Amino acid sequence: MMKKTFIALALASVTASTGVMAKTNVYKTDKASVDIYGSVRLIYESKESSIDGDNYVSDHLTLHDAGSRFGFKALRNLENGLYAKGQLETRLDGYDTGTRGTDNWGDFMIKRGWVGLGSSKYGEIRFGRQYTVIDSLRGASSHLTLSIVPLYLNKWGKEVTRYDYKYGKNWTFSANYNLSDARNGVTDSYDGQTCYEHYGCVDSEYVAGALYRHQGAAFNIAIGHKEMASDADNNQDGHENAIMLATSYTFENGLKLGFDAGFKHGEDSSYKGVGATATSSGSHTSYYQYDKADAFYVSPGISINLGNKENKIYGNYVYEKYDVSGSDDSLDSVKSNGVLAGISHDLEYRKIVVFFEGSYVEADQNFTGTTTDNTVKNKSINLGMRYYF
């Protein structure tokens, strides 16, 4: 009887046309509860990319999915102050199976699937496919779809163990360890590409971070280490060390000022850049292997409420610099400048939001030897809507 009641409530929650909520409780007892949540996210997108003025991604308009999701969260209280919890969240973008269409819809994939144990005294530990500590680092960026702030550490993984401990009212200390997405140089992530074909595939990664919240102030810092997965020929087997910082302050009137920064040192790894000419498959993406590289970025940002919390304008600027030595392709350095600006309006606060965003990033790739320096420009404009239930 209890199971039938739960199913009926879940179906009613999904099919109801009124009473939109960010999440709905569909099962509750003294010991356990289950919440259901989801959102439909669609955008019109126009983007254009060029190398020294020659377009390699033409300006065209598309209408596609932008992260629509559906999920469950479950919590069960145990004895002696312990609790168990879990989350299962699906997307329909064909990410794992390579079935994604031009509108970004595809087969079901599991974005989050984890279980965990915890207590208010000793903290919480989770196991499974989930976001990492890095997802909690938000300073300058307020974007909904576009992002120009680099990620030197991964914010999501398939085989993640994460621990969080809350100290007092303001501090949270976190750590995560990511097992490899790849075995023997090949990964089932990224539509079955090898690790070398998709920059950023790691053999293992561990991160430790601290988050501080007090009234309008927020400070986040994370330090991590990656062992990079090699390609099928074992040509890449390096490591990267990184630190990322995000801080912000929100005033009573809703004005938010933020600042992000990061530093990375890599050895025997690769940089994902843009080649001077297209490959046989039509792609301009190039992966420049190097012996050593140092990189950093800084990104100030601002968010302003327009009269009330339902209307907001936001934006941020980013500067990033890569210095490379021992590159097989003679890459010497890369300097990038980018800006992002957006405006959003909540038709119903935190339930239905429409937004308009645009970004422009320009990167100067400098080479030694006979390779000619080039300038890569990327422009994007998005108009979208999100419906949370």
Image (spheres, rainbow, N blue to C red):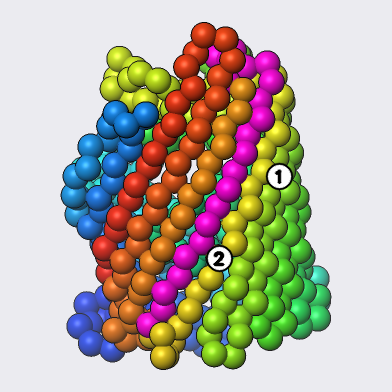
Q: How crowded is mark 2: few (under 14 residues within 10 Å), some or many (20 or more)?
A: many
Q: Which of marks 2 and 1 is in front?
A: 2
Please tell me which residue lies in front, 11 or 342. Answer: 342
| Tag 2 near tag 1, CB within 8 Å | no
Q: Can residue 113 be seen in this view?
A: no
Residue range (magenta): 311-331
> Residue 205 appears at what percent x and percent y?
68, 41
* Residue at figure coordinates x 39%, y 39% from the top left: 377
Q: Which residue is drawn at 35% across and 18% down?
A: 277
Tell me: 301 left or right of 353.
Answer: right
Q: Is residue 16 above or below residue 321?
A: below
Quarter of the image for residue 131 reads: bottom right
Quadrant of the rendered structure where residue 116 is?
bottom right
Which circle marks residue 263 in the picture?
A: 1
- The residues bearing labels 2 and 1 have C-alpha atoms spaced at a distance of 18 Å
Say what amino acid the circle numbered 1 marks.
Phe
Quarter of the picture containing the C terminus is bottom left
Principal SS element in the magenta part? strand
21 lies above or below 229: below
Horizontal relation, residue 317 to residue 77: left or right: left
- Vertical position of residue 383 compared to residue 242: above or below: below
Horizontal relation, residue 380 to residue 209: left or right:
left
**28 or 49: nearer the eye?**
49
Q: Is mark 2 on a helix, strand or loop?
A: strand
Tell me the quarter of the image containing the N terminus: bottom left
Q: Which of marks 2 and 1 is nearer the N terminus?
A: 1
Q: Of the numbered discs in the image, which one, if any, rests on residue 271?
A: none
The residue type indicated by label 2 comes to Gly
Front position in the image: 244 or 155: 244
Most extreme residue toward the top is: 370
Mark 1 packing: few (<14 Cα in 10 Å), some, or many (20+)? Answer: some
Q: Which mark is residue 301?
A: 2
